[in-house]
Image (tube, rainbow, N blue to C red):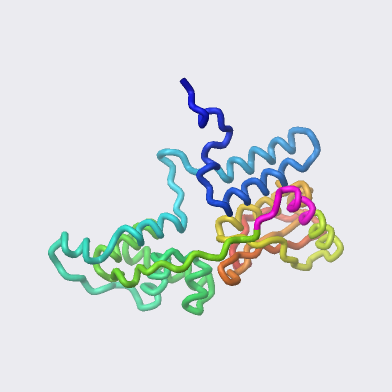
Amino acid sequence: MSSVADSFTFPWAREFDADQLAEFIESLWGAASGENGLPTLDAIEKVIANHRPPTAGESLLDESLIETIAQKVTTEVFLAAAGRTAAPCPLSKRELECLIELARGAPHEGVGHALGLSVQTVKTHLRNAYQTLRAGNAARAVAIAVHHGWISAPDLRLHAPPAPAEHRAPRDWAIIYRERVAALRDNPGTWHRISLYSSPSNARRPARSMCEGTYVQFRPPGTFDAEVCDSEQGQWPVRARYTGARVAISTPHPGGEA
């Protein structure tokens, strides 16, 4: 006998937090605002694919994975189990500082803000750290550093969660998008803020949808640029501009850096 949950079209969406669910509904509304036809259906399916969590066997590294490691492992546990003391750390001071901030749950933008570095510099330090530790990803690098005692228990103090983003009804977002897109078209090439989000990952999807024309207000595809800006008090703005011509579509990047 099937349960009530089996009848849900998006059972995985019921596991979203408030910000994620609001962003998912906003994206669906934006995609469904077009004319009846296959392009609108394609846009809706793309939104669903972008938000569906990875299934068993898939790998998707994000800040929550780093935060889980930071919450559950401590230096004392690893060293006591191994019966040894910490080995000298092969990382530079800056590389270790960036890795510690990452272990505390900060995204690249947050690491840069905490250390006074650009996002690109943070990425360079972390990439060097991964190579030195022979780690294939951030989670592995953090685990290695904790295991050897280079990141200690006090270092794993988590950052306070960001303030929740402002929530609006889907119909309100449709109106807001129409108004702001009209302003963009009146001022080609000028950047304007579109909306605020509580995390970089929540902000990247709508920014990409604006570039790709998934939202009907931002069609035809490729006529708008959109990007995620640096954090402002725990929230990440998305800004956009009207190019006045079709442009190559690329994945939006935080802070507008190449």
For the C terminus, give its image quadrant: bottom right
Above or below, 154 against 70 in this view is below
The x and y percentages for residue 168 are 69, 54
Above or below, 117 against 243 in this view is below
Determine the residue located farthest toward the left in the rendered image. 83
Total number of numbered discs in the rendering: 0
The x and y percentages for residue 240 are 72, 62
Residue 20 within the magenta-colored segment of the rendering: no
Determine the residue located farthest toward the right in the rendered image. 186
The x and y percentages for residue 241 are 75, 62
Residue drawn at 55 percent across, 56 percent down? 201
* Foreground pick, 256 / 55: 55
Residue drawn at 44 percent across, 53 percent down? 61
The x and y percentages for residue 200 are 56, 60
Residue 89 relative to residue 53: left or right: left
Q: Main secondary structure of the magenta part?
A: helix
Residue drawn at 74 percent across, 37 percent down? 39
* Foreground pick, 127 / 113: 113
Determine the residue located farthest toward the front in the rendered image. 4
Residue 114 relative to residue 170: left or right: left
Residue drawn at 13 percent across, 64 percent down? 83
State the extent of the magenta-drawn residues as a range: 167-177
Name the quadrant containing residue 78.
bottom left
